[in-house]
Amino acid sequence: MKQGFVEHTGQSESVEWYTPPEIFKTLDLVFDLDPASPNNQPVYLPAINWYTKEDDGLKQDWYGKVWLNPPYTRNEMGLWLQKFIDNGNGVALLFARSDTKWFHEYIPQMDSVLFKKGRVKFLLDGVGKGSAQAPSILCAMGKECSDAIKKFDGMYFDIK
């Protein structure tokens, strides 16, 4: 694996890391759109609309309050994050990869960031797989979403 400012590819061949329901319970928000939803959208995901891989969320219009847990694929993270920032309203769940180019380019453009205490126990392909490979951050755009990420245990930073 390359070191330094590269995007993380991880140990898993899958990019289908599902957000556990506890994240949504803590946020207590209903999202207008999940542009990177799994094909078998979890019933607990509080999004009114969603795009799956087949819809190609990067090519679609984003609107309203967005939930973003993007696919962790090489060279695409910046595309997802720029679209999230341009939308200006939502919460993104990301690995806290301060060793990557995308982290240094896009995280400073967020309204707020919370470095979550402890590791998220993602679901891999819909099945619990234990703790994530890296720590996580919740990034927010908009006041309501910034207030929502403050509910998590961790270090909160108001960037704007």
Image (spheres, helix red, strand yellow):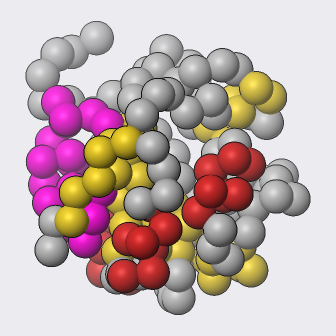
- Residue 145 makes an appearance in the image: yes
Identified at 70% across, 20% down, the residue is: 129
Q: Quadrant of the N terminus?
A: top left
Image quarter in which the C terminus is found? bottom left
Q: Position of residue 144 (x, y in %)?
A: 45, 81
Q: Decide: is 108 above or below 155.
A: below
Residue at 49%, 15% (x, y): give it: 11
Q: Horizontal and vertical percent for residue 38?
A: 71, 52
Which residue is pictured at 22% across the width and 57% down the height?
Answer: 157
Q: Is residue 77 visible?
A: no
Q: Nearer the viewer, residue 54 or 47?
A: 47
Give the percent coordinates (x, y) of residue 125: 74, 33
Q: Nearer the viewer, residue 93 or 22?
A: 22
Residue 152 location (% of width, % of height): 48, 50
Q: Is residue 44 left or right of residue 14?
A: right
Residue sitting at 34 percent across and 51 percent down? 114
Q: Is residue 138 left or right of residue 158?
A: right
Question: Magenta stretch containing residue 111, yes or no?
Answer: yes
Towards the viewer: 128 or 150: 150
Verify whether residue 69 appears in magenta. Answer: no
Start and end of the magenta stretch?
Answer: 96-113
Residue 84 falls in image quadrant: bottom left
Up-down relation of residue 87 to residue 118 (above or below): below
In the displayed structure, would residue 67 be above or below residue 10?
Answer: below
